[in-house]
Image (tube, rainbow, N blue to C red):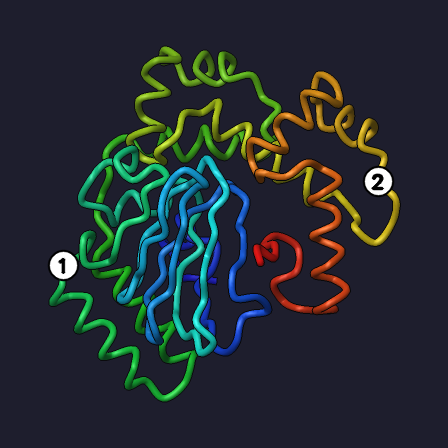
Amino acid sequence: MPRPPLDGLIDDLYYLEGAPPYARLTLPPSPSALLIVNLGPPFRIRAGTDVGTAEYADGCVITTPTRAWEFGYPPGTRSVGVHFKPWGPAPFLPMPAAELCDRPVTLEQVWGRSAIAGLRDRLATADEPREMLTLLEEELMRRLREADGLGLVRHMSGLIAATGGTVAIGDLSAAAGVSTTHLAQRFKEFIGVTPKRLARTYRFTATVFAIDPTGPVDWGDLAGGAGYFDQAHFGHEFRAFTGLTPTRYLEVRRRFLREHPGHALDGWPLPAD
């Protein structure tokens, strides 16, 4: 767990090394953001089926997405990174988060070439992963800046998260004493998406994590329990978020379980090959 005040912005810092379970992994949208400092061969990201694949050598920043991503990992992948809360990257970005929505950028574009080169050199010469994570945390502490208005977005996002995305957005703006338009503008500035979109993502993520792929799934009960209007609405949302039907998603999850039982990545990334 990162130290205060980073703990209010970050879920965790991580170290990743080795061979991925699949050369290509699909990552459905979730209410979180990501920073990767790459220390191995370049990796590839395809941010949606309608765009091409881009290569990232130094690393990248990904704000809260609205679509599934495809990651292409080299056999000897090695990196350190940050899993941010949805509003977490904002104090470290030189631009509004809305400019990065579904548009991953390199670390050089965010922090500059010399700064990233120096950080990667320090990380590469560290003795062990714990020291690397400490170095990354120190870099974040140095770069942390005040972001006027972030408190409102952080508080409202917390209410969305607490309800699993089922809270009415109009109730949020009323409680905050601001218009829905103002709230939406602030969310797009600091998170990159509107409160409504963030709530949809929280609700979908909570619903998917409630699925037990090892047993039978009653899709109607699952959709109703999550507050979806009907099973058709749930199916539409499923395809919008993952590009898969619910039954196809279950097949892919079961493939992961069958081929890589007990793997640390099981649960959210999906085989794309």
Given the current orientation, which residue lies at the most extreme left position?
114
Say which amino acid is labelled 2. Val
Q: Where's residue 96, x and y in %? A: 24, 36
Q: Could you tell me which secondary element the residue under label 1 belongs to?
A: loop
> Which circle's residue, 2 or 1, is located before the other in the chain?
1
Q: Where's residue 168, x and y in %? A: 56, 16
**Looking at this view, is 198 or 238 the one in front?**
238
Quadrant containing the C terminus in the rendered view: bottom right
Q: Could you tell me which secondary element the residue under label 2 belongs to?
A: loop
Give me the residue at 54% from left, 34% from top: 201
**Looking at this view, is 45 or 4 the one in front?**
45
Give the number of the disc on residue 217: 2
**Looking at this view, is 32 or 88 the one in front?**
32
Give me the residue at 68% from left, 26% from top: 234
Tell me the distance, in whole angstroms, between the alpha carbons under discs 2 and 1. 48 Å
Give the number of the disc on residue 219: none
Given the current orientation, which residue lies at the most extreme right position?
216
Give me the residue at 37% from left, 39% from top: 102
Position of 90 relative to 19 (above/below): above
Quarter of the image where one finds residue 45: bottom left
Neighbours of disc 2 within 10 Å: few (<14), some (14-19), many (20+)? some
Q: Relative to 221, is 199 on the left or the right?
A: left
Q: Relative to 110, is 171 on the left or the right?
A: right
Write down the residue under mark 1: 112
Give me the residue at 73% from left, 59% from top: 255
Position of 225 relative to 111 (above/below): above
Position of 115 relative to 269 (above/below): below
- Asked whether the beta carbons under mark 2 and mark 1 sit within 8 Å of each other, the answer is no
Q: Relative to 206, is 155 on the left or the right?
A: left
Position of 173 relative to 100 (above/below): above
Quarter of the image where one finds residue 167: top right
